[in-house]
Image: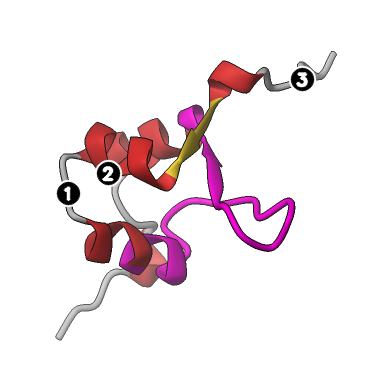
Amino acid sequence: MATTATVDDWLRTTEIKKFLKVGNTRVYQLINSGAFPVSRPSGGLIYALRSDVEKFLRNGYPKSEVSTN
């Protein structure tokens, strides 16, 4: 049975920044690199599920995306 995300499950970029303790530039770098999925429902504000950001925090980038240079 699938569960539906509630308003409290979604983080905006300002909340992601505080959660990860990083700056604006780093948040957008993470988003643009696909570190975690995001939603842009109106084409403006960006939202990410808290669980996806927590998963990234625990696991980091997927092995296939880590540079070995």
Please give left or right for residue 24 compared with residue 56 in the image.
left
The quadrant holding residue 66 is bottom left
**Residue labelled with disc 1:** 22
Q: Secondary structure at mark 2?
A: helix
Q: Nearer the viewer, residue 1 or 7?
A: 7
Q: Amino acid at mark 2?
A: Lys
Work out how far the residue at label 2 is from the one at label 3, CA to CA, in angstroms: 24 Å
Q: Which mark is residue 17?
A: 2
What amino acid does circle 3 point to?
Thr
25 left or right, relative to 65: left
Residue found at x 47% / y 40%: 12
Confirm or deny contact between disc 2 and disc 3 (CB under 8 A): no
Q: Which residue of the protein is positioned furthest toward the bottom in this rendering?
A: 69
For the residues labelled 1 and 2, say whether their Cβ atoms are less than 8 Å apart: yes
Marks 1 and 2, how far apart at CA = 5 Å
Residue 4's mark? 3
State the image quarter where residue 44 is shown. bottom right
The mark that comes first in sequence, 1 or 2, is: 2
What kind of element bears circle 3? Answer: loop
Compared with 41, 63 (above or below) is below
Q: Nearer the viewer, mark 2 or mark 3?
A: 2
**Which residue is found at the position 41% from the left and 70% from the top?**
33
Residue 5 % position (x, y) = 69, 22
Crowdedness near tag 2: few (<14), some (14–19) or many (≥20) residues, C-alpha within 10 Å: some
Tell me the distance, in whole angstroms, between the alpha carbons under discs 1 and 3: 28 Å
Magenta region, residue range: 29-51
